[in-house]
Image (cartoon, grey):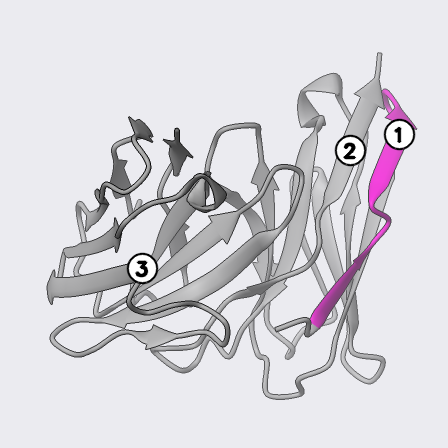
Amino acid sequence: QQQVKQSPQSLIVQKGGISIINCAYENTAFDYFPWYQQFPGKGPALLIAIRPDVSEKKEGRFTISFNKSAKQFSLHIMDSQPGDSATYFCAASKGSSNTGKLIFGQGTTLQVKP
Amino acid sequence: GAVVSQHPSRVICKSGTSVKIECRSLDFQATTMFWYRQFPKKSLMLMATSNEGSKATYEQGVEKDKFLINHASLTLSTLTVTSAHPEDSSFYICSARDGGPNYGYTFGSGTRLTVV
């Protein structure tokens, strides 16, 4: 299942800074790339997602950059806030298939210092 | 938006007993649901794909006789951990496809299982 590799494992950012998390995938059949935020004891919540027909998507302070040829995508959190402190997971799936499995990266623990 | 309800949120059971976890899609029909397991400070590991009206598809290394999955309706999938042992203690999370145009996967809030 280890088809999505995520880095870094942990990240410390000052309030107001930019948090950057990277992911790489192997399966070229993947066509859906979401990012999830998870707080302790809770299920993951969708932050933002992208499909391979666009290279960038922005929603508020969150931006996904997608490089199809390199099979990489990244999450940028602008103006990071202490409330953003959580674990972030990238994922990938063949979303166009009804049974497409969502495969997760290893996760990044983000700490935003006030 | 799409909502998935998962119950119970926490359960403690004795070794050797069985535990059932329910996953319900509240405002949409989910032909496909997924079950994940998550260890502390680790990622979500896909256990199985549950399809309404048919047998679940298990990932390699997951014991189908240990983790029984039933998807009897378009809004309900259940995971039963049979003859639970302390090593089955974990955080179990379900997910459902909401069938929308954005390939959405909606997650439940998870179940913390502790086997004593």
The amino acid type, in three-letter code, at marker 2 is Leu
Is there one chain holding both mark 2 and mark 3? no
Q: Position of residue B25 (x, y in %)?
A: 21, 50
Element type where label 2 sits in the image = strand
Q: Residue A31 at what x, y percent from top left?
A: 57, 78
Q: Residues within 10 Å of mark 1 (few under 14, many from 20)?
A: few
Membership of A50 in magenta stretch: no
Q: Residue at x 81, y 50 (%)?
A: A21
The residue type indicated by label 1 comes to Ile
Q: Nearer the viewer, residue B51 or A28?
A: B51
User: Quick check: is A16 in the magenta stretch?
Assistant: yes
- CA gap between label 2 and label 1 equals 6 Å
Residue B70 sits above or below residue B56 on the image: above
Query: Residue B78: horizontal and vertical position, in percent?
Result: 20, 53
Label 3: chain? B
Question: Alpha-carbon neighbours of circle 2 within 10 Å: few (<14), some, or many (≥20)?
Answer: many
Q: Which residue is mark 2?
A: A110
Answer with left or right where residue B41 lies relative to residue B86: right
Query: Which numbered circle lies on residue B67?
Result: 3
The residue lying toward the viewer, choosing from A44 and B1, is A44
Callout 2: chain: A
| Element under disc 1 | strand
In the image as oriented, which residue stretches furthest toward the top? A114
Marking on residue A12: 1
Separation of marks 1 and 3 at Cα, in angstroms = 38 Å
At 57% from the left and 30% from the top, the residue drawn is A39
In magenta, the rendered stretch is A4-18
The reply to the same-chain question for discs 1 and 3 is no
Mark 3 lies on a secondary structure that is strand
For the question of whether residue A17 can be seen, the reply is no
Number of labels in the image equals 3
